[in-house]
Amino acid sequence: MAEAQNIPVGSATAGSIAVAAESTVATRMSAPPSFDVGDFPVPHGREEEWRFTPLERLRGLHDGTATATGEGVKVDVQAPEGVTVETVGRDDARLGKAGTPVDRVAAQAYSSFEKASVVTVPKEAVLTEPIRIAVHGEGGVAYGHQVIELGAFAEAVVVIDHTGDAVLAANVDCILGDGAKLTVVSIQDWDDKAVHVGQHNALIGRDATFKSFVVTFGGDLVRLHPRVAYTGTGGEAELFGLYFTDAGQHQEHRLLVDHNVPHCKSNVVYKGALQGDDAHAVWIGDVLIEAQAEGTDTYEMNRNLVLTDGARVDSVPNLEIETGEIVGAGHASATGRFDDEQLFYLMARGIPEQEARRLVVLGFFAELVQQIGVADLQERLIAKIEEELEAAVA
Amino acid sequence: MATLEIRDLHVTVEADNATKEILKGVDLTVKQGETHAIMGPNGSGKSTLAYALAGHPKYTVSSGTVTLDGEDVLEMSVDERARAGLFLAMQYPVEVPGVSVSNFLRTSATAIRGEAPKLRHWVKEVKETMERLNMDPAFAERNVNEGFSGGEKKRHEILQLELLKPKIAVLDETDSGLDVDALRVVSEGVNRVRENGQVGTLLITHYTRILRYIKPDQVHVFADGRIAESGGPELADKLENEGYEAYVKGGASA
């Protein structure tokens, strides 16, 4: 009887560590970053950044045929006292400061939104309650833009909660002043038919700490680009992700940590569970350590737990190092299967099959969920995971 | 008094697109309070017997019966067998990433006992049992069998044996891979469970070494898928001196 081990299951797991003179992370994009959708050719699906994505399920977000319907999504922002919440026009100077769109859909979103939402936490304000941004899909097509800006030494938790049904392309900019601490939880709890594509940029100030949780459960297709860069030394980024990909769903997370400044840290942990036919999860983890970024300390990890046959994982960590004067750099990717041997072991101790599955999956996600630090959210996520597990048996 | 009765048990496995019979008619009765040692050469089917009793899906029972206090064990699912009072200490315990030992033990004890153990008593019970097995308390927060040494895995199996208090315990080569100190600690754990007289023990082993610590009432020699000879503890001494040669030559395939 063999011991259980991690084995790739219908997966293509590839990793590389490149020591490059020029940035392949940048050059393998089919066009340079731009705010103008016209600068990007319509993808045909064979481009490096589109090859995992089923274009036909983007509902026209990628080729200009998806027109905003006016009742795409309803956005409601609840913020504690002291926080400024504004709805602004396209010409507001604060838009687009955290990063430039890197693919056609992000540029389409930037070129198409009519109003943007700007949430500002003044310097040194320490919030005790989260800012809650509810984005509810009303069944139409929508483009959006959200800015979250923290002044120096401000501290805040922001929850962006996506529910309902929509075809949405929307970007999020997070700007952290010096010494600021920002946690952003983006929950994709969409109905089954929703399509959601977006780029989440964070610009981290000197000695500032950015913590991101990307939690993807729902949708027909979700494709997000969480990206981080630094404006001063001593910045720290922790990027956590959790996804539960069911039959027929496509959930894609493409990360970039750009170590463009010396003495910054980053830590990436994304974990996913998959179940059902044609459940497809894609994780791309790019870390770039630029030549000037001495003293960088970075690690990225992706783990996938495949619960049934018929699911597919593509996991591609990619670490590019242009200087050897760093503290540490590493990556790991593993795709394992909840296998018959594990099930047998737990059942041989009297634990019924359904309970055994629950134990393994909740255990797998627990370390991430516990770090969110917002009690009602943690409870909701655990409940959601249990719901997903029950759906699998039904 | 709990009794496990195995009658004319035949078990097959699928290997290389062929069905292979591993157990060829096993008869054995184990009663509460008794300890039976099953000894035999590699490939004789000892471990197959252990896994077939626990209900591992790889093994198919082609004929014969297994009953526990008259109840048909073969009709039960794996978890039902465990709740009925069967326990298998595995030769190769399985890693379960993401599930802590303490969570696993409590979930298991809740399933076996039919109700969640009272937290205060439970914590004390686990702590004391771990101490007796020379296990570091930090062990409880590690993931089940993940990164455990061979000795740690076996102690963890015996920890479960002590906590779950089965009617029938099958110990599959619990002694293999253990040094003398670990073997003594693990054997003491088994003996603590045996001493209360509530458990029937089926001790499967390749070596006679463990029988110096755990005294069997009966010794059975397993060869070519069935029990070739049964006797008292003196049979183990004979095996110690003469090995399995006599049993292997006479018709065994390997």
Image (cartoon, helix red, strand yellow):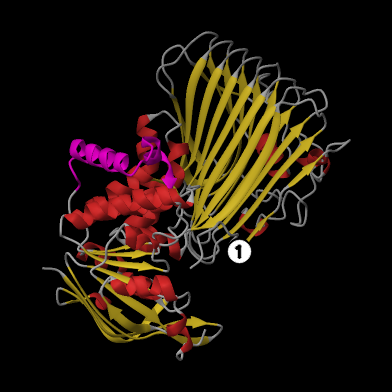
Question: In this picture, is B208 found above or below B220?
Answer: above
**Apparent side of residue B252 relative to residue A108 in the rendered image (left or right):** left
Please indicate, yes or no, whether residue A28 appears anywhere in the rendered image. yes
Q: Residue A145 versus residue B192: which sits nearer the camera?
A: B192
Residue extending furthest toward the right: A21
Tell me the residue that label 1 is attached to.
A10
Please state the extent of the stretch shown in magenta in the rendering. Answer: B116-144
Q: Outermost residue, left direction? A: B1
Residue A219 location (% of width, % of height): 51, 51
Q: Position of residue B67 (x, y in %)?
A: 20, 77
Choose between A48 and B63: the one closer to the eye: B63
Q: Chain of mark 1?
A: A
Residue at the outermost bottom position: B251
Q: Quadrant of residue B197?
A: bottom left
User: Is-magenta flag for residue A196?
Assistant: no
Residue shown at 38%/56% (left/top)? Answer: A357
* Magenta stretch contains residue B126: yes
Residue at 27 percent across and 78 percent down: it is: B231
Q: Residue B125 location in percent, x, y?
A: 23, 41
Q: Residue furthest front?
A: B241
Q: Is residue A97 left or right of residue B234?
A: right
Q: Does residue A71 appear in the picture of this structure?
A: no
Q: Is the magenta region chiefly helix, strand or loop? A: helix
Please name the residue shown 54% across and 17% down the image.
A120
Question: Would you say B190 lies left or right of A287 here?
Answer: left
The amino acid at mark 1 is Gly
* Depth check, front residue: A308 or A343: A343
